[in-house]
Amino acid sequence: MTATKAAFIGLGTMGYPMAGHLATAGHEITVFNRTRTRAEAWVREHGGRLGGTPAEAAAGAHLVFTCVGNDDDLRVVVYGTDGAFAGMEEGAVLVDHTTASGLVAREVGRAAAKRGLGFLDAPMSGGEEGAKKGILTIMVGGAPETFAKAEPVIGAYARAVTLMGPVGSGQLTKMVNQICCVGIIQGLAEGLNFALRAGLDANKVVDVISKGAAQSWQMDNRARTMIEDRFDFGFAVDWMLKDMRIVLAEAGENGAQVPVATLVEGYLARLQEQGAGRLDHTALIRLLGEA
């Protein structure tokens, strides 16, 4: 792979190891993070440069990667005199890994085009473990020629990178992913709670049914911790609630019926109200233990 000058903006749970994989692959990386000490730690660990603003980080980069919290966070790091667009040169490509709305993806895509820049919305599946191991699944929206510039580099931290359609298609695909995930998690929570209340050995139940049609990634990786009431890891309630609200807003626009997602959004909101927002979203099972 040819070494590329790139910037990575947003060194959170996912972005920190993703940027690390880019550095390990030999790319020239400049990083920016809102909490400067985290960016400084990344540079000490991986080398590269530290940008004082997103614009400084993006200056001269062929590819600029963003991985931040939500729509508004993306706007902050992209727009304005300190934003990434201000530092990017014509022909450069912004790859956004934030799980955000289709609305903001299309908005940023239009703004990029006006500046002669490429844009890809590229949300991910695989979680923190996938980011650390470099085996994420990336679903991408954008033009084929723009995708071709970025795909080989994205491969440094992904095992699958797929162009789903025009700008916004990546975010829409991620919404489908999240709809499926919450449905499976809620079903798993109800099944495990049923097993426990019926006096069964829940671990033995999982051993048996995971060999059949009920098997899923969630069962293989989360059933044991749900049984043990351990949730101090993983994909937080706060994050999944944010994603579900994006789903419901999009469904309101396109007319899709999402009754299970709507139900689980309410359950996630209840957990957040109870102060459980930082727990893994499999804490949904706790609600089934309420009187």
Image (spheres, rainbow, N blue to C red):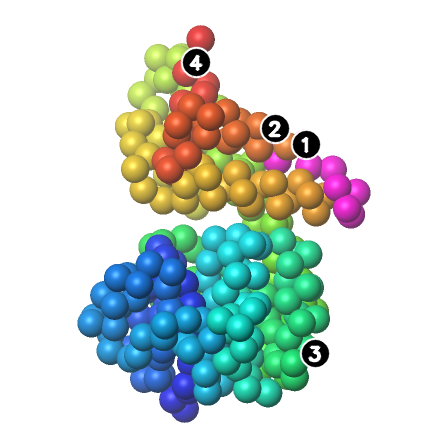
The amino acid beneath tag 4 is: Glu
Spatial CA distance of label 1 from label 4 is 22 Å
Q: How many discs appear?
A: 4
Spatial CA distance of label 2 from label 1 is 6 Å
Measuring 49% from the left and 71% from the top, which residue is drawn there?
82
Determine whether label 2 and label 1 are within 8 Å by CB: yes
Give the mark nearer the N terminus: 3 vs 2.
3
Q: Which residues are magenta?
A: 252-261
Which label lies toward us, 3 or 2? 3
Q: Position of residue 60 (x, y in %)?
A: 46, 87
Determine whether label 4 and label 2 are within 8 Å by CB: no
User: Dot 3, crowdedness within 10 Å: few (<14), some or many (≥20)?
Assistant: few
Give the mark nearer the N terminus: 4 vs 3.
3
Is 256 a magenta residue?
Answer: yes
Q: Position of residue 218 (x, y in %)?
A: 43, 41
Q: Which residue is mark 1?
A: 259
Foreground of the two, 78 or 98: 78
Spatial CA distance of label 4 from label 3 is 53 Å
Determine whether label 1 and label 3 are within 8 Å by CB: no
Q: In the drawing, does residue 146 fall left or right of residue 250? A: left
Q: Which residue is mark 4?
A: 290
Relative to residue 255, is residue 18 depicted above or below? below
Relative to residue 77, is residue 70 depicted above or below? above
Badge 1 marks a residue whose secondary structure is helix
Main SS, magenta region, reads helix
Spatial CA distance of label 4 from label 2 is 17 Å
Q: In the drawing, does residue 131 fall left or right of residue 41? A: right
